Structures are given as structure tokens and as C-alpha cells.
Amino acid sequence: MKKERFELNKLTPVVSLIVMLLVFTVLTKGSMISPYNLSMLIDQSVVLIIACCGTIFVSAQGRVDLSVGVNCAFSAVIGDLAYRATGSSLIMVVTALLVGVGIGLVNGILISRYKVPSFMATLAILIGLRGIINYIQSIVSVNYASDAIMMLSENQIKLPLLILIVLIFWYLFEYTSLGRYCKAIGENEVVASSVGMPVARSKIAAYALSGLTAAISCIFLMARLGGTSTTMGTFFEMKVMTAIYVGGVLVRGGSTAKMYKAILGAFIVMIIENGLKIMGYASSEISEFVQGLLLMVILFLTVFFELRRQKVKKAAGQEA
């Protein structure tokens, strides 16, 4: 019976993806699965998938990173300034990556060393950096991406890089001690610490990786948009969180966190967004409303199943 429940849990995100694809195929009268739209769907999913690959380390610990969107935007803006100063796309990319990792390290240190709740720490970073971005872009005109960056918009370059990035982070999360530590912290941080796991270092590393993928995604986003913008990364963190939770990762994290769930969740979110646009609901407000509604449902179900799990565990303890 346990094995059946386990297999069902593994298949849930796959079934959800198929159901959403079928629903929007019917609602859009087949437009959803046209070759052109499927190509667009994959193209639009790249940035979200990359961001999810790093944020899953944070989610596995039962924590959140609300700074993903602003980190993406800030890394792009600072990278753009580096490009203006040097004219080098390589320096721009390296600068953006360093900024992204740096912001992630700040988050991790605040949370692990100073015990600031992840929600408050990353929210403070979000608000502070968004103000800095607005100030910079008020005195420096928005710039276009270089030709080298724009090459990332070509599928023959973008898709192989996406596959490489996914494989690297998949290996790190599923087959290294860091991934195991993150899941153990999500299951029970006290126990993880008592058995000698490097809890503090694992938290810092998780947020650093989340910052790294936010910066990588900003480079691909610049290629797609053709440069930076004043609204870049706005509400992107909500989209990342929705993707991870819709994919079947519980809010408490732990062993439910799987890389494939985050990736499938990203596709589910983009199918919903893409389907709404085809149906004529192209405004971001409608898309954000649907994503917010999804998050509310997921949180409700998470609380419900967590209470049920605790009840079953308590009953089992009494029987013993």
C-alpha cells in the first residue's frame, strides 16, 4: 500500500501536466498544441526552469526565496552597467553571476547566522534592491543586449545550454550530500543538526545556488527581451514558487522535493499562462490572479495533508 502511494505521488505532477495540456487544448480549440505554439511554450519556459533549478534547494529546506525576481533584475542591471563600462559581454555575464551569488550569500547568512526568518530576510532584500534598481534606471537609460547575449535567444544555442544547466543542478540536488542535507533540514532541522549535518553551511549554499540561477535566468531573459527593462523580474519569484509547489513539492520541503517536480511545475505554470493568452486573457493581472489562486489552493492542501500526517503519526505512536 505504501509503495502504491509512493508511485502515485511520483506520477502526480506528470498527470497534472497532461491534464492541463488537454484542458487548454480543448479550450483553445487545438491552438495550444500547434507546432508553433509548442515551440513558443518551450522558449518561454526556459527562464523559469533555470530559476527553479536553484530555488528547489531552498524549497527542500522548507524555506522561501522572495528575492529571486529582484535578484534577476538587479544582476541584469549591474551586468548592464559593467557592459557599458567595458564593452565586454564576458565581463557582463561574470558580473551578473557574481552579483546573483552575492545576493544569495547575503540571504543565506541572514537566515543561518542571524536566524532571520526566510520570508522576512528575502522580502527585505526584495524591497531594498527594487528601490536601487528604480533609482539606477531613473538616471541611466535602458540599454539593449549585446549581439553575444542575443545569440542566447536562438534555440540551437539556448536549448543545449538549458539541458546542460538542468543536468548539472539535477546531479547536485539528487546525487550529492548538499541535496541530501537540504532535504534532511526540511524533514527535521533539529535532527539534521544533532547527527552532525552542516545545517548553517547548507542553508547558505542553498541560497547561493538560488541566487546563481536567478542570475543565469536574467541573462537568458535579457536575450529574450532584447535588454533590460524597468519591470524586469517583477513577480517572478511568485511564478517560481508556484511552479515548485504545483509540481508537487510540499511547502515544508523534505523528501517531497524532487528536481523533476520543479521542472514539470514550471511547464504547468507556463501552459496556464500561455493558454490564457491564446484565449484572449493576455493581461498580466489575469495570469497573476490565477497563479495566486493556485498558491492558495496548494497552501490549503499542504496544511490539510500535514495535519493529517501528524494525526496518523500520533495515532501510530499511541498504538506502539
Image (spheres, helix red, strand yellow):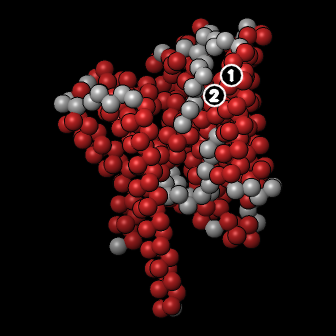
Q: Is residue 152 left or right of residue 45?
A: right
Tag 2 near tag 1, CB within 8 Å: yes
Amino acid type shown at disc 2? Ala
Amino acid type shown at disc 1? Val
**Separation of disc 2 and disc 1 at Cα?**
6 Å
Numbered-mark total: 2
Badge 1: residue crowd in 10 Å (few <14, some 14–19, many ≥20): many
Which residue is depicted at the point 31% across and 24% down?
37
Q: From this view, report whether residue 318 is shown above or below residue 101.
A: below
Q: From this view, report whether residue 246 is shown above or below residue 280.
A: below
- Residue under circle 2? 73
Instruction: For residue 55, say whether it is visible.
Output: yes
Task: Provide the secondary structure element on which disc 2 rests.
Answer: helix
Q: From this view, report whether residue 210 is shown above or below residue 63.
A: above
x then y, percent, for residue 27: 21, 36
Q: Quadrant of residue 237?
A: top right
- Residue under circle 1? 77
Task: Provide the secondary structure element on which disc 1 rests.
Answer: helix
x then y, percent, for residue 233: 57, 30
Badge 2: residue crowd in 10 Å (few <14, some 14–19, many ≥20): many
Which residue is depicted at the point 48% across and 15% down?
154
